[in-house]
Amino acid sequence: MTQPNEVSEHRTIGVISDTHGLLRPEAIRALQGSDVIVHAGDIGNAEVLRKLRAISPVFAVRGNTDNGPWMKGVPASDSVQFCGFLFHILHDIGRLDLDPRAAGIHVLISGHSHNPAIIQRDGILYLNPGSAGPRRYSLPITLARITIEGEELTPEIISLE
């Protein structure tokens, strides 16, 4: 695992995934006020990243549908430290190639399934913000927010419908 980026002054993290080229106005409104934004892949195009960066700094990973020259420099996974918590970001949790607990990860963010989920397991927060892009089947249109206050992480799923 590479050395994580350190972002210590941030308290509110907007988490989005599976936009597939569609950044809804509701998502932009919900992400306002985020100190940083994490995009967990299947971004869709460079315009989505440009619009997100207009709100706040962005940490993005590529998804299985992301390709082309605009993806240059976007990693398949990334580790970032926010306020002393180690976050690991990847698109498809099924491709996780490390032991999160042994790696000291506090939060594992993934997308891919389009199914929002907040799961606490073995002291690790697993967060999938769901899909904020085009509707897939009958799954909801969502993103997530993590608030950090001292030693507390508070995740929430936000409906965009």
Image: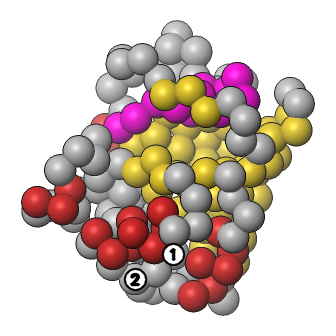
Q: Relative to the observer, which residue lies in front, 6 or 142?
A: 6
Task: Identify the mark at residue 22; answer none if there is no mark.
Answer: 2
As helix, strand or loop, the secondary structure at mark 1 comes to: loop
78 in magenta: yes
Q: Residue 130, percent across and down?
A: 54, 65
- Quarter-wise, where is residue 149 in the image? top right
Q: Quadrant of the N terminus?
A: top left
Q: Give the mark nearest the N terminus, 1 or 2.
A: 2
Residue at left 61%, top 33%? 7
Q: Disc 1, disc 2: CB below 8 Å?
A: yes
Residue type (three-letter) at the residue carrying disc 2: Leu
Disc 1 marks which residue? 132
Q: Relative to the observer, which residue lies in front, 138 or 159?
A: 159
Residue type (three-letter) at the residue carrying disc 1: Ala
Span shown in magenta: 77-87
Residue 74 in the image: above or below residue 43: above
Overall secondary structure of the magenta section: strand
Q: How many neighbours does mark 2 have within 10 angstroms: few (below 14), some (14-19), or many (20 or more)?
A: some
Residue at left 33%, top 26%? 97
Residue at left 58%, top 67%? 55
